[in-house]
Amino acid sequence: MSKYTTGEMAKLCNVSVRTVQFYDTKGILHPSELTEGGRRIYNDDDLHKFRLICTLKAIGLSLNSIKSVFESELSGKILTTLLTEQAKLLTGEIDERQRQLEMISAIKETICDKAIDPANTILGIEDIMEKKNKVRSKKKLYMIYLGVGVASALGLLVMVWLVISKIWWALAVYISAALFGILVSALHLKDTMFICPKCDSVFKPSLRQAFFSTGNHKIRWMTCTECGHKDWCVLRKQA
């Protein structure tokens, strides 16, 4: 079995040496051995795992989620399901872009044709723009998650300030608005479907699970409503 230094691992996976060291510090990828001088030494299994980590990171999984998945007894099945769902998403995006290209070609031919139909051409362009807007909406979803995190931190600071200032009516209004926002978010999450890594069932979480579950927009820590197994469940991509 081959052995690799930190620098060799970084070069093989096209990342910086600091990244390899950081993953060791985070407890995601420990070296197989350490030399007497404290140098990290990795083997082929470590290299395979690190490449998988880099792939999962590239498709949007957080380092904490990756670490949690690897610690699960069903890590292999969770990762397989996760990659399958991501492949469905990418395939759908490719098909959508291909349809857009075909529509653009058809519209260009129509414009060059003397028997042009302006109404149909406009409808075709509007259809293309609508599909582009859907793609932009997916990108906005990531920004929403970031915004929720920042807003939560700021909200806590505001609550502390209101308590210190003893502005009780404002505090009551603020808490009511915050609870309403949390309820709406939980109800939205409850409408999404998740895949259990143990029984492969597709289920909807309860409102309590939706409210208290941890994770991100790809996997969340939940209890399957079908078999009762608690683990990282993969968000099912909508068709």
Image (spheres, grey):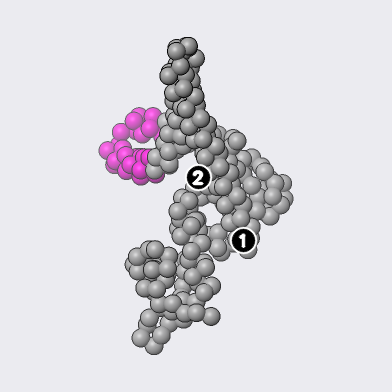
- On the image, the x and y values in percent for residue 144 come to 41, 38
N-term-proximal mark, 2 vs 1: 1
Q: Which residue is mark 2?
A: 217
- Mark 2: amino acid: His
- On the image, the x and y values in percent for residue 110 come to 47, 19
Q: Residue at x 52, y 40 (%)?
A: 94
Viewer-nearest residue: 25 or 11? 11
Viewer-nearest residue: 20 or 93? 93
Sort mark 2 into few (<14), some (14-19) or many (20+) by Cα contacts within 10 Å: few
Q: Residue at x 55, y 59 (%)?
A: 69
SS assignment at label 1: helix
Magenta stretch bounds: 147-175
- Tell me the quadrant of the picture where the C terminus can be found: top right
Q: Is residue 2 left or right of residue 19?
A: right
- Mark 1: amino acid: Gly
Viewer-nearest residue: 149 or 47? 47
Q: Mark 2 vs mark 1: give the one in front.
A: 1
Can you say whether 209 is above or below 14 in the image?
Answer: above
* C-alpha separation, residue under disc 2 versus residue under disc 1: 20 Å
Q: Which residue is mark 1?
A: 76
Label the magenta part by its dominant secondary structure. helix
Q: Residue at x 43, y 38 (%)?
A: 139
Residue 171, quarter of the rendered image = top left
- On the image, the x and y values in percent for residue 48 come to 52, 68
Can you say whether 99 is above or below 201 in the image?
Answer: above
